[in-house]
Amino acid sequence: MYEDGFHGDCSKTYLVGEVDESGKKLVEATNACLMVGIGVCRDGEKVSVIGEAIEKEAKARGFQVIPAVAGHGIGCNFHEPPDIFHFGNTYKKICRRFLFDGYKRGRVNLRSKINSVWIH
């Protein structure tokens, strides 16, 4: 997406065909993580609160975040800082109005580590 000199991106997950119950729960959890991440964004708030909220929501739903994947800010270039980690962290960057790109869907996975199903 490009508007008024700013790059951003967005995504939406759709269920296609027959999806098992664990897949449906995963997609519901990613949407819930997105909404809680958006819900804590405030001008002047630490960026780290987004990750804390996403991790808490994912764990409450029986999932875990994938720490190697992060969201990002928007700007004149694509995928600009700051990195938006989806877990509790000590990143001190401050949220500023229009800093985020509609916020990327929180990445979570089923309880196994590397080779599990994951969504973004």
Image: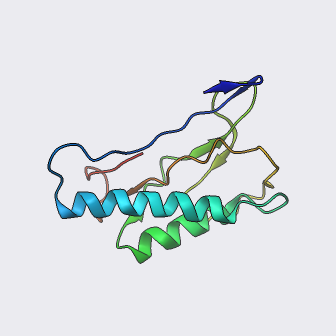
Residue at 57% across / 34% down in the picture? 9
Q: Nearer the viewer, residue 56 or 29?
A: 29
Residue extending furthest toward the right: 44
Q: Is residue 65 left or right of residue 93?
A: left
On the rendered structure, is 115 left or right of 95? left
Picture layout, residue 18 above or below residue 22: above
70 relative to 49, above or below = above
Confirm whether residue 119 shows in the render. Answer: yes
| Residue at figure coordinates x 77%, y 22% from the top left | 5
Along the horizontal axis of the image, is 28 left or right of 67?
A: left
Query: Which one is nearer the viewer's eye here, 86 or 105?
Result: 105
Q: Image quarter for residue 79?
A: top right
Q: Position of residue 12 (x, y in %)?
A: 44, 43
Of residues 115 and 78, which is closer to you in this image? 78
Where, quadrant-wise, is the C terminus in this rendering?
Answer: top left
Quarter of the N terminus within the rendering: top right
Residue 91 as seen in the image, left or right of residue 71: right
User: x, y percentage for residue 17?
Assistant: 17, 44
Q: Residue at x 30, y 64 (%)?
A: 25
